[in-house]
Amino acid sequence: MLRIRNFMRLAAVLVGIAMLGAPTQAQAAFQLRYSLDGGANFSSPASDGLGGDLDGPGNGSILIFAGNVTITAHATVTTLSTPLSIFDLAVSGSLAAGVNLVVQMSLDNIPTAPPPQALTVNFSGSTNPALVSTAKTWVDSGNNLFTTGALNTPTAPNPGFIKAAVTTALGAVSNVSFSANPPYSVTAQIAVNNTGTVASSVSLDSNIQIAAPVPAGFVLALTGVPALGIGAWFRRRTMARLTA
């Protein structure tokens, strides 16, 4: 019984070490901007529309209005259990004729690791009348806000490279793998161009997830320790009965 208690203490210590070894959540900037001319000029709100500051912690929400269009952005970053970062950028409302809307959200100091990380982008929604719309997502190892470009492009002002550059069509899901050591940044974009002569009803949502599983070797080692301990306990019980 004493050996079992010692084994349980050892298992608890190993779990504690695993939790302490996980990357800590860093203070991050979460920002949003939009353009009504296809990205030639951007406007950035002074606040998050919910009584907060855009330079605050990365986890949070932003709500702004661009004419009759509502723009929302959400970010959730966790390092507990399986490291995971979830972002959501949505556009809804009435887009006036002749408006080429580009919306971008960006978050830096993302800690989700270890590499290789899995990036999933789900772009859903509709426009009526139908408009051309796309979602784009970039991962910047230089940890800069609003970094866009082609894969493996150097970034400035901090040294780094674009580790993922994904374009997702409406109704599609993109899955890519990338390798970036934290901290790094993510920029997500929705673009919708109303080239018609009447306003279009738009409801678009880009959901982005970055996942990094716990190293398989460590999980195997950690899960194997209880099995070894239980096996040894059964062997001792069996030998005690045979010699009794």
Image: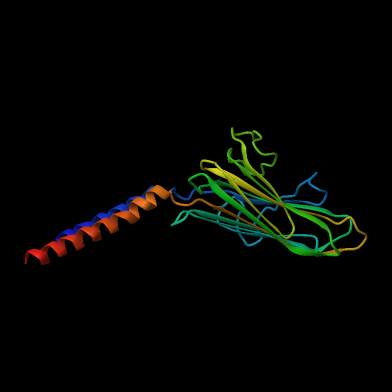
| Rendering coords of residue 124 (x, y %) | 71, 62
In this picture, residue 97 sits left or right of residue 18: right
| Rendering coords of residue 25 (x, y %) | 47, 50
In the image, farthest residue toward the left: 244
Does residue 1 appear in the picture of this structure?
no
Q: Nearer the viewer, residue 230 or 242?
A: 242
Q: Nearer the viewer, residue 235 or 1?
A: 235
Mark count: 0
In this picture, residue 26 sits left or right of residue 217: right
Reply above or below: 21 against 62.
above
Reply above or below: 152 against 225.
above
| Rendering coords of residue 44 (x, y %) | 71, 50
Does residue 68 appear in the picture of this structure?
yes
Q: How is the image coloured?
A: rainbow
Q: Nearer the viewer, residue 177 or 111?
A: 177
Q: Residue at x 24, y 57 (%)?
A: 229
Quadrant of the image containing the N terminus:
bottom left
Query: Which quadrant would residue 180 be assigned to in this image?
Result: top right
Q: Residue at x 59, y 37 (%)?
A: 142
In the image, farthest residue toward the right: 197
| Rendering coords of residue 97 (x, y %) | 89, 59
Q: Nearer the viewer, residue 219 or 129?
A: 219
